[in-house]
Image (tube, grey):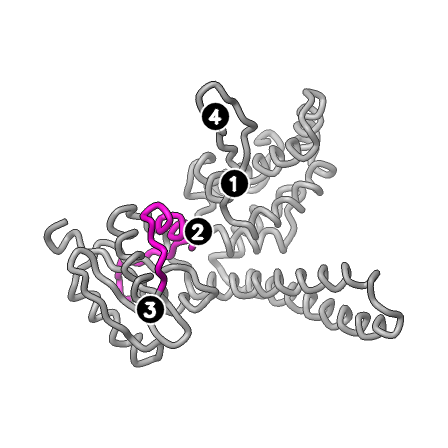
């Protein structure tokens, strides 16, 4: 690489500090993950005029960093850790320190060049936080319910109390989500388009808006691949394997799975599609996954056309 137009930056985000590495110069430095450190970082990076800055998702610690760099007009990209871990294995990189991770991210930025995607607005970030909090609460409820058959009788009262608290928190989260969507001009019409589809309720609509901001901006093939419901071939030589879905955004897929269960009963078009697949010999899970993908494609089309559900679209 040569010239300032080919500068790539990797930033490893930890709780207390940020390790920064630059390709092709190999320069590295550390910035405290503090208000002062985040104020200095954009200026340091702007002086390099990078073409791409890669930050790995790290449990939420990266959000402020990404938002700060995006607000400064820098070309920041947040990537899935699985991508960078696979890249490291392909390179045979076994050692792991914060500085080495930053160098790996810089090399990933330079060689893989992950595409930039629109950064969420403050309202969208708030929506994402609420959606993920609700998701955590639902997981807590499911875990506790699964443990109940194994509890001693004297522990059931505590379990009941916990489930009651979690139920109230989930209901409050639902109210907060509804209030946020209704108060945001950029979210309210999109939520209405999505909820006009039989099977898509307020929580599923909020999850799609929070976790899939690309909705309506991609082709049907691209949106299916983003969510992880596009089947990939498993063929090699004379061997032919079953096509499988893989990767993608798990929270979106989980929300759409529950929506698809409802839609194949309440949406005549999807019900007919599901029955046609079952009649053709497809296993029920495969048929439901195909309905999930069709439901996603319909959501994408409505957001693209900015319109409500039309049964002929299915």
Q: In front: mark 3 or mark 2?
A: 2
Q: Residues within 10 Å of mark 2 (few under 14, many from 20)?
A: few
Question: What secondary structure is marked by label 3?
Answer: helix
**Residue 155 horizontal/vertical position (percent):** 83, 73
Question: What secondary structure is marked by label 2?
Answer: helix
Q: Which residue is mark 1?
A: 246
Q: In front: mark 3 or mark 4?
A: 4
Whichever of callouts 1 and 2 sits on the residue coming sooner in the sequence is 2
Q: In front: mark 1 or mark 4?
A: 4
Structural distance between the alpha carbons of marks 1 and 3: 32 Å
Q: Residues within 10 Å of mark 3 (few under 14, many from 20)?
A: some
- Work out whether residue 88 or residue 173 is closer to the camera in this orientation and state it: 88
The question of residue 84 being in magenta is answered with: yes
**Residue 176 horizontal/vertical position (percent):** 61, 67
Whichever of callouts 3 and 4 sits on the residue coming sooner in the sequence is 3
Q: What residue do we see at 33% from left, 49% from top?
A: 92
Whichever of callouts 1 and 4 sits on the residue coming sooner in the sequence is 4
> Which segment did they paint magenta?
72-96
Whichever of callouts 3 and 2 sits on the residue coming sooner in the sequence is 3
Q: Are marks 3 and 2 in contact (CB under 8 Å)?
A: no
Q: Which residue is mark 4?
A: 235
Q: What residue do we see at 28% from left, 76% from top?
A: 39
Whichever of callouts 1 and 3 sits on the residue coming sooner in the sequence is 3
Q: Quadrant of residue 173?
A: bottom right
Q: Are marks 1 and 2 in contact (CB under 8 Å)?
A: no
Whichever of callouts 2 and 4 sits on the residue coming sooner in the sequence is 2
Q: Which residue is mark 2?
A: 82
Q: Which residue is mark 3?
A: 68
Q: Which mark is residue 302?
A: none
Q: Quadrant of residue 270?
A: top right
């Amino acid at each position: 690489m040569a010239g300032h137009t080919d500068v790539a930056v990797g930033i490893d985000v930890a709780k207390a500090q940020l390790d920064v590495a630059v390709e092709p110069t190999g320069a590295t430095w550390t910035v405290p993950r503090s208000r002062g450190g985040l104020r200095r970082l954009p200026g340091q990076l702007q002086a390099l005029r990078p073409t791409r800055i890669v930050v790995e998702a790290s449990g939420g610690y990266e959000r402020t960093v990404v938002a700060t760099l995006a607000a400064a007009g820098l070309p920041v990209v947040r990537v899935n850790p699985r991508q960078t871990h696979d890249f490291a294995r392909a390179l045979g990189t076994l050692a792991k320190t914060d500085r080495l991770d930053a160098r790996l991210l810089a090399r990933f930025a330079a060689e893989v060049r992950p595409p930039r995607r629109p950064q969420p607005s403050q309202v969208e970030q708030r929506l994402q936080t609420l959606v993920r909090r609700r998701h955590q609460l639902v997981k807590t409820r499911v875990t506790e319910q699964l443990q109940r058959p194994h509890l001693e009788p004297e522990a059931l009262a505590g379990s009941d109390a916990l489930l009651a608290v979690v139920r109230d928190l989930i209901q409050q989260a639902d109210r907060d989500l509804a209030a946020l969507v209704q108060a945001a001009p950029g979210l309210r019409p999109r939520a209405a388009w999505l909820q006009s589809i039989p099977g898509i309720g307020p929580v599923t609509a909020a999850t799609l808006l929070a976790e899939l901001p690309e909705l309506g901006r991609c082709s049907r093939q691209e949106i299916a691949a983003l969510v992880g419901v596009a089947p990939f071939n498993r063929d090699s030589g004379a061997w032919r394997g079953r096509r499988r879905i893989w990767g993608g955004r798990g929270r979106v897929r989980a929300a759409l799975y529950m929506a698809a269960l409802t839609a194949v009963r309440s949406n005549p078009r999807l019900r007919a599609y599901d029955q046609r697949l079952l009649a053709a010999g497809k296993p029920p899970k495969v048929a439901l996954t195909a309905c999930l993908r069709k439901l996603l494609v319909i959501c994408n089309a409505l957001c693209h056309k900015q319109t409500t559900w039309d049964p002929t679209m299915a």
